[in-house]
DNA sequence: CACCTAATTAGATTATATGTTAAATAGCAA
DNA sequence: TTGCTATTTAACATATAATCTAATTAGGTG
């Protein structure tokens, strides 16, 4: 069932932007972080919030950690929004 | 264009619940507030956050203030979520 | 006007979020 | 082991959010 943490995670513009980057590809923490004018520990905190919300999943490969979107939870969020606003799923 | 305030507004469970109540009917501040175990000023603050995000619209009728869902912004939020997750709008 | 009701605003407190630098951990490779 | 790179965790400061009680505003009605 949909986690309240997901909505909190979406409240920050950097986190929403990270999710967009992960729509189509896996990226390492460093690859993501270098796109933002923010310290690595701060970025790491954002990853952690997204992970807690299960919006992203981490996989270590050597000494990189790759993040990818959790499509299942993304879908749950969409359903949650539609439920809130009473929007019908078409098809 | 979609306001970042809308996502913040959705981060609080009480505010999401208020929006659900306003899916199908207008309700006064008092009618909404009595459903929650929270002071009226606190509820008023939540209304204010939702108003700031343009998710709800207020209309005074005599002594009562009626709130209703702003369907346009609700739709923008849904589109925003679909954009983040790269979900295609069907039809 | 005086009074009542509905709702908000003010002022304060506490909790949570966001960000930093410094230190720690994990893996790889010489 | 030593050293290097990638990333996180710790410790802390500051900002924003959430909540309360008390006071105020706005609109009815006698």
Image: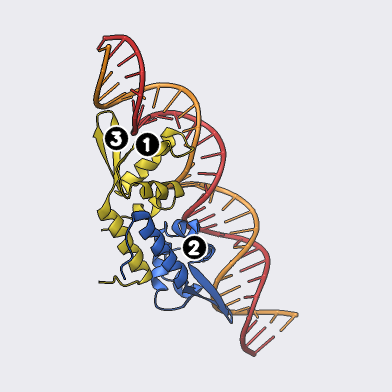
Chain colours: A blue, B yellow, C red, D orange
Picture coordinates of residue B20 (x, y %)?
Answer: 37, 50
Quadrant in the rendering for residue A85: bottom left
Q: CA distance from mark 3 to mark 2?
A: 39 Å
Of circles 3 and 1, the one toward us is 1
Q: CA distance from mark 2 to mark 1?
A: 38 Å
Q: Residue B31, labelled with which disc?
A: 1
Of circles 3 and 2, the one toward us is 3
Dot 1: chain letter: B
User: Does mark 1 fall on the same chain as mark 3?
Assistant: yes
Query: Dot 2, crowdedness within 10 Å: few (<14), some or many (≥20)?
Result: some
Picture coordinates of residue D4 (x, y %)?
Answer: 59, 79
Front residue of B45 and B74: B74
Marks 3 and 1 close (CB-CB < 8 Å): no
User: Does mark 1 fall on the same chain as mark 2?
Assistant: no
- Please tell me which residue is depicted at 40% across the width and 52% down the height of the picture: B10
Q: Mark 3 highlights which residue?
A: B65
For the residue labelled by badge 1, is the local secondary structure a helix, a strand or a loop? Answer: helix
Q: Earlier in the sequence, mark 3 or mark 1?
A: 1
Give the answer, above or below, for where B43 lies relative to A9.
above
Image quadrant holding the C terminus of chain A, namely bottom left
Q: Mark 2 highlights which residue?
A: A46
């Amino acid at each position: 069932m949909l986690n309240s943490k997901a909505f909190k995670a979406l409240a920050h513009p950097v986190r929403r932007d990270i999710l967009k980057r992960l729509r189509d590809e896996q990226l390492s923490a460093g690859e993501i972080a270098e796109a933002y004018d923010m310290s690595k520990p701060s970025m790491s905190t954002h990853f952690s919030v997204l992970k807690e919300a299960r919006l992203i999943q981490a996989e270590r490969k050597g000494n990189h950690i790759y993040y990818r979107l959790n499509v299942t939870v993304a879908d749950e969020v969409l359903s949650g929004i539609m439920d809130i606003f009473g929007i019908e799923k078409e098809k």
